[in-house]
Amino acid sequence: MFVIISYVWYSTYGRILHCTLLHLSYIQKWILLHFEGLDDEINVETKDPEFKNWLWMNPNELSSKAIYFKKDVYQKINRIFVPLIKDFIN
């Protein structure tokens, strides 16, 4: 399953730019995969790491852990992916 979701991030840096609100629009591409490997095969310690660490978590907890401007993104992705995950598990 492949999903594209966009969101807008409003930054307070706009105050520096002539008192206008700066907004940046992002598009994320989400892919639902089934990982069959071992946890120790996951390595985020690369030359230019994007993440400090990782963990498995219940998808329903994602929006409560997300930064404020991404909460809606995680809620949208859960509406699509959680039913698919449940079908796969059952």
Image (tube, helix red, strand yellow):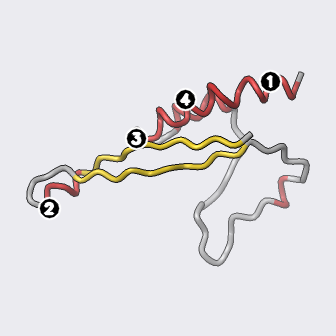
Q: Residue at x 22, y 51 (%)?
A: 12
Question: What amino acid type should be assigned to the residue bearing mark 1?
Answer: Lys
How far apart marks 4 and 3 lie (CA) works out to 12 Å
Q: Name above or below for residue 74 compared with residue 9.
A: above
Q: Residue furthest bottom?
A: 47
Q: Is residue 27 left or right of residue 37?
A: left
Q: Which residue is mark 2?
A: 16
**Viewer-closest of 2 and 11:** 2
Distance from disc 1 to disc 2, alpha carbons, whole Å, reads: 47 Å
Q: Label 4: how many residues lie within 10 Å, few (<14), some (14-19) or many (20+)?
A: some
Residue 43 image point, x, y percent: 75, 64
Camera-nearest residue between 87 and 46: 87
Q: Amino acid at mark 4?
A: Gln
Q: Nearer the N terminus, badge 3 or badge 2?
A: 2
N-terminal of the two: label 4 or label 3?
A: 3
Which sits earlier in the primary sequence, circle 1 or circle 2? 2
Q: Earlier in the sequence, mark 1 or mark 4?
A: 4
Q: Secondary structure at mark 1?
A: helix
Q: CA distance from mark 3 to mark 2?
A: 21 Å
SS for dot 2: loop
Q: x, y percentage for residue 63?
A: 53, 32
For label 1, the residue is 86
The three-letter code of the residue at mark 3 reads Phe
